[in-house]
Image: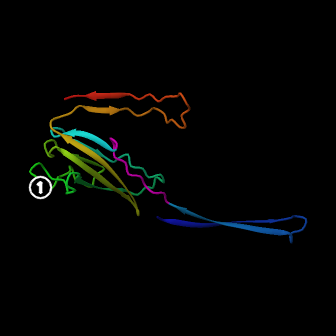
Amino acid sequence: LATESYEFQCFVALTSNPNNNNTASVAVDVTQQAITANIAGGKERTSGTDQELVLDATASVDPDDMASSWSFAWSCVNKTDGAACTETDGTTPLALSPNATNAVARVPALSMSAGTYEFTVDVKKDDRNGTASTTVVVTQGAPPTVGIGVLSASKYNPIADSYVQLAGSAVSA
């Protein structure tokens, strides 16, 4: 990570006797913070063979908010055998749409067989990088889509007997 070093020095002298003085200094190294890769939908989710799977890393965070551009690299592993993911024919490498370098990657419906897969995104910005993974259980057909709404305000240090209210939704095809 890029580092800038600064030295701050403070000189103090008595006005009545300038020879009575002292100096203190401190070195400060300022570095860029690490970026955080995030995949919408959490650590695990279920999708159906008849549904498009959308993988979204646009919520990845640069705490320094640097103006440089992001790069994304998606990959997929079949958790059953550890092999790279393939299309339903078992041999063609799984294609992500529009490609594996976008913040949002899509797997078209009818592209994957039922099974358990791990999708990983490697996010880079300047010389910093972050990684996030999500497990996707693909089942036959089109299971209902479930969502939980975001909180309207952050909640810190909840006290005993307090609660957080979430709003949920479900859609079935």
Q: Is residue 165 left or right of residue 110?
A: right
Please state which amino acid type lies under the numbered disc 1: Thr
Taking the view exactly as shown, the residue that stands out farthest to the bottom is 19
Residue at 38% across, 32% down? 149
Residue at 23% across, 49% down? 117
Residue 46: image x %, image y %?
25, 39
Quick one: 113 or 14, which is closer to the camera? 113
* Element class at badge 1: loop
Is residue 15 within the magenta segment?
no
Residue at 48% across, 65% down? 2
Q: Is residue 106 left or right of residue 34?
A: left
Is residue 39 within the magenta segment?
yes
Which residue is tagged 1?
92
Residue 11: image x %, image y %?
76, 66
Q: What predominant SS class does the magenta segment belong to?
A: loop
Taking the view exactly as shown, the residue that stands out farthest to the left is 89
Q: Is residue 111 left or right of residue 124?
A: left
Point out the image quarter for the C terminus.
top left
Applied colour scheme: rainbow
Across the whole image, how many numbered discs are drawn on residues? 1
Residue 64: image x %, image y %?
48, 54
Residue 120: image x %, image y %?
29, 53
Taking the view exactly as shown, the residue that stands out farthest to the right is 16
Mark 1: few/some/many CA within 10 Å (<14, 14-19, 20+): few
Please provide the residue range marked out in magenta.
32-42
